Image: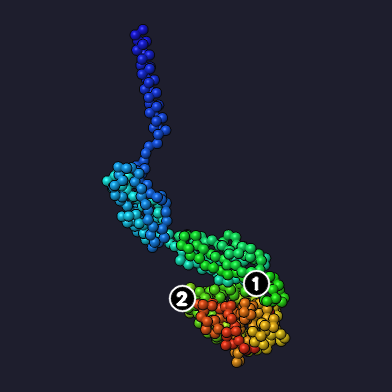
Amino acid sequence: MKNRCTFISKINLKLLISVCFMVLLLSVTITPVTAASAKIRLDRNVCTVKKGKSIRLHAHILKKKYKKRKIIWSSTKKSVATVSKKGVISGKRNGKTTITARIKGTKFKAKCSLTVVIPVKKIEVNTPRMVLFVGEKNRISARVNPSNATIGKLEFISSAPDIVSVIGEGNLTAVAPGEAEITVRSTDGTGVYSVVKVIVNDIVDTSLTSSGVNSTIINMMNLIEGYSAFIKQYGSLCYKNGNNPVLTYEAAKAKAESNIRIPLNCASPANWVLYELGFMPKGQIYGTPNGFVITSTESRAIIESNADFIKAGDGIGSCVQDASDSGALYYGDILAISIGGINHTVVYAGRSEEGHALVYEAGGIAQSIGYSVCGCGPIDYCKSSYSRYAITEIIRFR
């Protein structure tokens, strides 16, 4: 009997020990262990700072007994970012580091994962101004400068979505006649932006053309807008050279990227667009007071299949402004103008609100205004010293 009682007591003792162990285990599992970092907390655990800029982190000591102790700040990569005694972080170079705040004399600390970003300084767009027609779709091409900016994503916002809607990265749709500004903004928090002005016209707009507008004219004028933006951007390198201009946009761009001067003449925008649209072999130019010199029979045949060479009738013999006033000029006309035995070339761009004739050209007029200011247009031709000379020929696309 005694042995049996002893046996039962041993079983109860083992059971009691097992139960106590389980209770202890459950208490450990249910009650979270308080980490050392819980004694101090930062207002942010993850943050970014722009290279060359500063932000401040704030540390909060949670344990009352440590409230009066100093906080020791440190950065794991001082080459990326440094931190002052007061938690002010200064971004040094692109990269990542960890900022630690520790309660002096203890092991209690809190950490923040920091990324130093290269900020966007400028947004370059392919054109500052675009002409569309109702129902037409187009796209704004934009890039950030510097190209290695950490956050290169851009957002596109239309000031008048009922006139020009924008979807995604610069995809435009002309909805109704009018004007809208498309703001291209950096998303890295710098606030850097560029604006593209978009003008939407009806397909038949008598202020521009009495015969409607086809896709060739639309493409041509959008290309010239892009050339104008390029010339404006690199205006300090551009100069007038009537006899030996750079013959293609690609060649001009290569010079700009190598910081080499860019020789232009009045016909450069027209030449470049004819090359781009495949109407002229690259390398041909035209001039003379008698009109355009298209020496290639094949090239002239290509142009004549899409355009008319007009040498008589309305507008011929008149100055640009008079021809515009009479409605003789169509939007996108390439004009040859005789100036004392020299052929001057402009592309007609419609009329200003004041009724002044507007043209594109990259010669003397653009130079006198300043390439960095106007690019190559649209230029108010009424203010030109060439404004009273007669039109000798018109290339008009059908």
Q: Is residue 332 left or right of residue 81?
A: right
Q: In the drawing, what numbered circle is on residue 259?
A: 2
Residue at (59%, 81%) from the top-left corner? 380
Residue at (36%, 50%) from the top-left corner? 59
Screen quadrant of the C terminus: bottom right
How many numbered badges does the structure rendering display?
2
Please name the residue that numbered disc 1 is placed on. Answer: 218
> Do the numbered discs 1 and 2 sit on residues whose CB atoms are within 8 Å?
no
Q: Quadrant of residue 344?
A: bottom right
User: Can the viewer see residue 323 in this picture?
Assistant: yes
> Which mark is first along the chain, 2 or 1?
1
* 170 vs 250: above or below: above
Q: 302 or 77: nearer the eye?
A: 77
Q: In terms of secondary structure, where does tag 2 sit?
A: loop
Q: Pick out the residue farthest to the top.
A: 1
Where in the figure is residue 368, as x and y percent of width and height? Answer: 52, 84
Q: Quadrant of residue 265?
A: bottom right
Q: Pick out the residue farthest to the bottom.
A: 340
User: Can the viewer see residue 284 in this picture?
Assistant: no
Of badges 1 and 2, the one in the foreground is 1
Screen quadrant of the N terminus: top left
Q: Is residue 83 left or right of residue 305?
A: left
The three-letter amino acid code for the residue at tag 2 is Asn
Residue at (30%, 42%) from the top-left corner? 65
The three-letter amino acid code for the residue at tag 1 is Ile
Q: Quadrant of residue 226?
A: bottom right
Where in the figure is residue 202, as x and y percent of width and height? Answer: 68, 70
Residue at (36%, 11%) from the top-left corner? 5
Where in the figure is residue 195, as x and y percent of width and height? Answer: 54, 68
CA gap, disc 1 to disc 2?
Answer: 31 Å
Q: In the drawing, what numbered circle is on residue 179?
A: none
